[in-house]
Image (cartoon, rainbow, N blue to C red):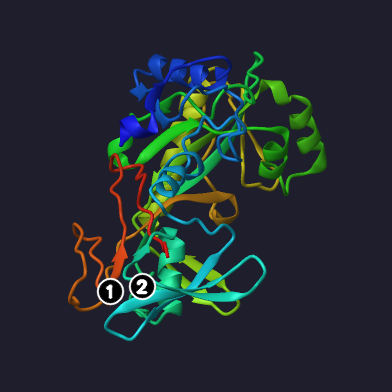
Amino acid sequence: MTTRLGVITQRHGEGNRDSQLLAAGAERLSWGWQHADRAVRDCLHRNRCTTGCTSGAKQSMAVSYLPQAEALGAEIRPDTRVVRVLHDGRTAHGVLAVGPDGARTVYRARAVFLAAGPLGTPALLQRSRIQHRAAGRRLSLHVNLRTIARFPEEVHAGRGTIFTAQVKEFGDQGVLIMPANVSRGSLAAALAGRPAPDTRRLLADFDHLGVFTTQVRLHGTAAVRAVPGGGLLLRHAMTAVDHSALRDAFRKSAELLFSAGATELTRRWPRPRAALARRRRGVLPPGPPAGLGTGLGARHGFGRDGGGRPRRGVRRRRPPARFRGPAGLRRQCAPGRDGNQPTGHDHGVRP
């Protein structure tokens, strides 16, 4: 699979000064880091990895598996959304889908593969009345802390690829630190809610800024429920241990970024009268305040619920991702590359 997708170790190339600074800071602290492995071919370093690669270098489904599936005879129905799996309680025999024109179509199938993601799959199971009480009750997420760092030198963080360095010194604690995509638009969004003078000042100094993300694995679990109208309701229960882990992760990130040469850190969540955290005689800024919800993002969701009793004809996966449902219904779940950043954990529907 890695050969088919062109997975490479992404070295520092043109741009990516933010990754180089992060790696240098880690080395000064004797912290472990490594280059990132990415599924990419002939990257042009346009820094559009998360918003849509304009060169086709990123090996997304659109340029990898979907063309291969079409070559083998599969039909791709773009802009068509599955709203329910059709079954009689014992056997799944198709799906009900809505096309781009709003028309509903029934697709009959001998097998239905669930691959709609960690949020979409449990919602679809709930709407289909398939193990609907258990589906979506054991969702796990990695939480992101975003930190904006100012450097005395020009960083030009908008150049290069998404990142070429990951600090994994605390991987056994579920903490990864790396640069993030940055543009003037994304920076303005990260500064939303701050006083206008602070926002204008930082945007004016854009070339000296880098945006870094700290991914933290939490102990509390999340739950997702389908709501009328096609929406989703996501609830995440954070424990006292999780709050402590977030504070500790931010302190680690601050120490690393100051070691990398940063002179000022701006946390994404606003804090009255103390929005900017500065380095003063080596004293690190405090951890996140109590109201963390407005400053966190969620990544790498993966489900762990399998449903009720086993049914005949259901393909079993490794625990705890075992799914039990009607015959003819299969749930796809790929394991992650390591314990900190799962990379497959996608479940969904393919009619």
- Where is residue 260 shown, x and y percent of the image? 51, 19
- The answer to whether residue 328 is left or right of residue 288 is left
Callout 1 secondary element:
loop
In what quadrant of the picture does the C terminus appear? Answer: bottom left
Q: Is residue 312 left or right of residue 321?
A: left
Taking depth in this image into account, of 51 and 56 the one nearest to the observer is 56
Per the image, the residue denoted by label 2 is 135
* Quarter of the image that includes the N terminus: top left
**Direction from residue 167 to residue 57 in the image, left or right:** right
Among the 4 quarters of the image, the one containing residue 105: bottom right
Q: Amino acid at mark 1?
A: Gly
Q: Which residue corresponds to the image point at 48% horizontal and 40% vertical from the top-left?
A: 60
User: In the rendered structure, which amino acid carries the disc numbered 2?
Assistant: Ala
Kindly identify which residue carries mark 1.
307
The residue lying toward the viewer, choosing from 173 and 79, is: 79
Inspect this view and state whether residue 282 appears.
no
Which residue is at the front of the view, 10 or 172?
Answer: 10
